[in-house]
Image (cartoon, grey):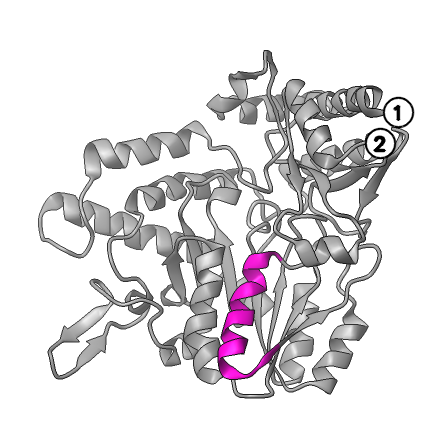
Amino acid sequence: MATTSQQALVNQIRAEFPILGRSVRGKRLAYLDNAATTQKPQSVIDATAKFYSDQNANIHRAVHELSEISTQIYDTVRAEFARFVCAPDADSVIYTKGCTESINLVASSWAEPNLEPGDVILVSHMEHHANIVPWQVAAERKGATVVPIAITDSGEIDLEDLQSKLKEHRVRLVAVKHVCNTLGTVNPVRQIVEMAHSSGALVLVDGAQALAHEEIDLTELDADFYTFSSHKAYGPTGLGFLYGRKSLLKQMRPYQVGGDNIKIVSFEKTSFADLPNKFEPGTPNIAGIAGFAAALEFLQRIEVSNSNSAARVHEQKLLELATAGLLEIPGVRIIGSAPNKAPVISFVCEWGHPHDVGTILDQHGVAVRTGHHCCMPLMKRMAVPATTRASFAVYNDEEDVEQLLVAVRSARNLLWN
């Protein structure tokens, strides 16, 4: 049970999220689909609205006051975020639409120009499709190959298999996620980076699920590329970041071309802007960036980067309670038992398909995700067609856990033959 002080903290945080006060199907909302997208605090909603109502103008385009305000927001948020994740240089942090675009940018601008026939890109069996398919497309165009890294039955990257493949193949890049969106596994990314670099390979880390739950120190981690998503960390949709080693970004061609990433244009020759503008053509999601400034303040306030903070301890407590409670329900099996997990649980029920389970849970006001979670190779590896996934955020509480357990028991009663 939560202590009085812990409950007070959770109540205070929950009060910042207006959507949590609504009902679903006539029931209290227990929103447990946070790995898909988190809800937004009122501060983020207000900051986004304030931009459109009081600050709206394009960046880098004019000398009038509103444009200056927009440009300041744009540049300031980049610098503050770079400090938050300990990036060596703010110019190495590129605005994108999210992790998917960030990975596609690297696949197009680094992989395709640098891959040669016979080269290999390693990706783990637990990767999201967005960290598999772009590499397949780039590899196919250049005669290279994408080779999977094995994972264990508990849902952890098999480091021995990684080491073996680094020795066996001419590996140019290792692409892995920091936190698994399906299993919750927190991967030993620093160790993976060291192993890859020792073999002469670069590393891209998909950090979509990490920003809301883990400490990220890009200087210490030493990855060559790292991707971020705003909407999975209490910020607006349609916004993300790509960190890249500056020496690599300078060599890479622009992913897209157009307005703001141009230095000089003539019919004889065009030259491109310096970093970071080189990779940021067109009008960006300025309102989303203004909203993310508030999300970043929220992340700092709840000390998400502190493993001993009340928020992090609370999330782990919810994970433990939900895990124990689900295992007490006959016919429920949890997929993924890594000892180091973010607050994500995927489970299967021998008495019901995940879509049926999810539909019944929705009738109880419980929002979960069902299906393959854009991880078909992982589903095949774990020998399941799909799972039901409950994923927690700092605003969830023990009542959400109990609502989940009651709903799963109800589903069993309805579906058990």
Residue 402 screen position, x and y as percent: 75, 22
116 w.r.t. 153: above or below = below
Magenta extent:
128-145
Residue 197 screen position, x and y as percent: 62, 80
Q: Which mark is residue 351?
A: 2
Crowd band around label 1 with a 10 angstrom C-alpha radius: few (<14), some (14–19), many (20+):
few
Q: Is residue 400 left or right of residue 39?
A: right
Mark 1: secondary structure: loop
Is residue 225 among what the camera can see? yes
Cα separation, mark 1 vs mark 2, equals 7 Å
Q: Residue furthest top?
A: 26
Q: Is residue 132 magenta?
A: yes
Q: Residue at the location (33% across, 66% down)?
A: 279
Residue 139 screen position, x and y as percent: 54, 77
Q: Amino acid at mark 2?
A: Trp
Q: Residue at the location (77% across, 32% down)?
A: 322
Q: Is residue 53 magenta?
A: no
Mark 2: secondary structure: loop
Residue 397 screen position, x and y as percent: 67, 26
Q: Nearer the viewer, residue 269 or 241?
A: 269
Q: Which tag, 1 or 2, sits closer to the chain's start?
A: 2
Which residue is identified by label 1?
A: 417
Confirm or deny contact between disc 1 and disc 2 (CB under 8 A): yes
Q: Is residue 261 left or right of residue 246?
A: left
